[in-house]
Image: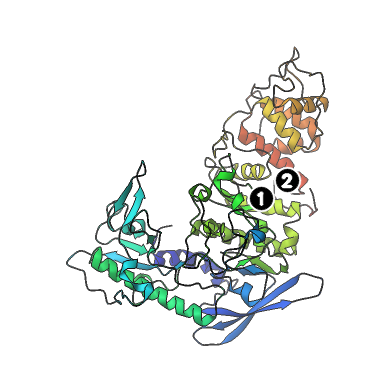
Amino acid sequence: MATTPVVAATAMNEAIAPYLESQQLQLIANSEPEVVLKQEVPGRRRRVVGIRFRHRHSQQRFTVMAQIVIEATDLGDLLALGGLESRVGQESLHETGEAALPTQPHPDCQQPFTWGAIVELMSPRQHQEIAIPLATETDPWRTPEDFTADVWTHASNDRWKRWSFLSPCGIFRYGRCWRSHGYQHPVLPGDVAVIAWATAQSPNLPIRYGNDYRFGSLVGVPSAVREQHLQQARDRTRAYLHFLHTHATPNCQPRGDLTWSDDGLATVPYIREARRGIAMKTIRHEEIAAQFYKSPRAACFSDSVGLGTAPFLDLRQNQAIGHVQLHPQAAQVKPFSLPVGALVPIATDGLILSSKSIGTTHITNAVYRLPTVEWAIGEASGCLAAWALKHGKNPHELITDMALLRQLQGKMTRHGIPIFSFDDVPHDDPDFEPIQMMAVMAVVGSGCEDTLQFCPEVAVSRAMVAVILVKFFNLATMTPVVPTFHDVLPGKHGAYAAVETLYSSGIAEGIGRDRFAPNLPVTRSTFAMWIRKSVPEVYATAFHKIPADATYLRRRELVRVLYKISLSRLRVDPVTQKTILNVNTH
């Protein structure tokens, strides 16, 4: 999502414009919450019923009453204002159960924040002196020794390569958000970049040399202290720009017209860590780190409502003492999902957690706070709020009602929102919804072992279908001492129990001569017969638009049929996708 703030703001404003014009949505800018309005009854979950705001410019106060409030502030301010269950900074081993943590919490150990800026590379004849504060030796957040214009990358054989500011792998190109010459890769005059960077002066030194502000925290401190750190962070970025101007290139000029400011600095800083709500589900280090999984994915939550991916835990440190030190192997991450339970407060109704305040820990927030994941969190929060309002339920009730939860996941995938990691099934695939849903329900997984591929066009073996159907229909497994088929023997074939179960249940038969042919692809006609014997009442609907012929059954057709059966179980019309009757189906 590399673009200028003006382009991004235009795109988002255009998206909400119809709702503003129809008065379905009212947007009130430049306001901050002051009071969280609650209803508290002994013995019951408290309920958030509204927020009182103050307009920053006019100082006028106003109240918004709501059935559901989404906590999407940058710093988790609603949790603090409402006195709601939350955590700040680095927790203890006792609080989260993460083995990497110390026995004592360290609330001051938080990720640094960064006040970004936008600069343009000018031609030599265009450059001007930058009217910004010099780096000084008296203020630790502005010392010139704390800055560098270079970045190091790991080459090979423990060798490192140094890149200058304007080089192909340098800081400017990394943050480039506008190319003046189309798809030209080199950095050229007219290019525009975001400066929000932390690097080191050498591979052996800690990452701290850039405009990351690590000299204090914004969460869990008095408002006056917060304002002091915000101002010092702005000063640090100005000093860093001056350093780049004098030590890297004199041709970079701030572009205040792109940031709605005089100095090219952003209107607000980039926050990496907020106050986190204690949710019904807390996502732990052991559920996302690569070292705990042999498969290509991290934990696949059955209540997933979004996805994320990152190569490693970007766990930066401020100057507080006691930060957890993760071994490089422990910091590697595999593709992960977003459980809806992490969006629901443990003891509060009327509130949905979002942004960086969901049920993560100090460690797992390091990947869930990334922009692409935060976008997914926002989508999920909005969908959950709308779904709860539609069905007249509190979010915590909705996510424990399996039928409604599956319907919510189905609606999200129907609109192209992924909830299970596959890299060969785009969101516009005609079977995107059934593939995603059958995967998140653990009915099917990757078609190619040790990959993120579903392989939708691959044929399915008879043994594999037997295993899937036994699990899908929750059949009581049969393991007779004497095998029915001599090509599916106990202890020698992994599908033995499944094949015997389908045979004993009168669903499947062999191909003759006491053979089942487990590795032979199943045909559509054979699969149709098995489905007709299993659920005759929905057979016609399940095989809608799939001919029961001798063609080998593809994986996409398998999940398409099973998903239609699932919809009938969830009281959803498989054709219209409309709810027939809300029941608690497990």
Question: Can residue 264 be seen from the camera position used here?
Answer: no
Q: Amino acid at mark 2?
A: Leu
10 Å crowding of disc 2: few (<14), some (14-19), many (20+): many
Question: Can residue 207 be seen from the camera position used here?
Answer: yes
Inter-mark Cα distance, 1 to 2:
9 Å
Q: Amino acid at mark 1?
A: Gly
Report the residue marked by disc 2. Answer: 567
First along the sequence among labels 1 and 2:
1
Query: Could you tell me which secondary element the residue under label 1 belongs to?
Result: helix
Position of residue 294 relative to residue 3, above or below, is: above
Query: Could you tell me which secondary element the residue under label 2 belongs to?
Result: helix
Mark 1 near mark 2, Cβ–Cβ under 8 Å? yes
Tell me if 493 is positioned left or right of 286 in this view. right
The spot of residue 439 in percent (x, y) is 64, 42
Residue at the limit of the structure toward the top, as seen here: 513
Tell me if 93 is positioned left or right of 573 in this view. left
Report the residue marked by disc 1. Answer: 410
Q: Nearer the viewer, residue 372 or 379?
A: 372
The spot of residue 175 in percent (x, y) is 36, 59
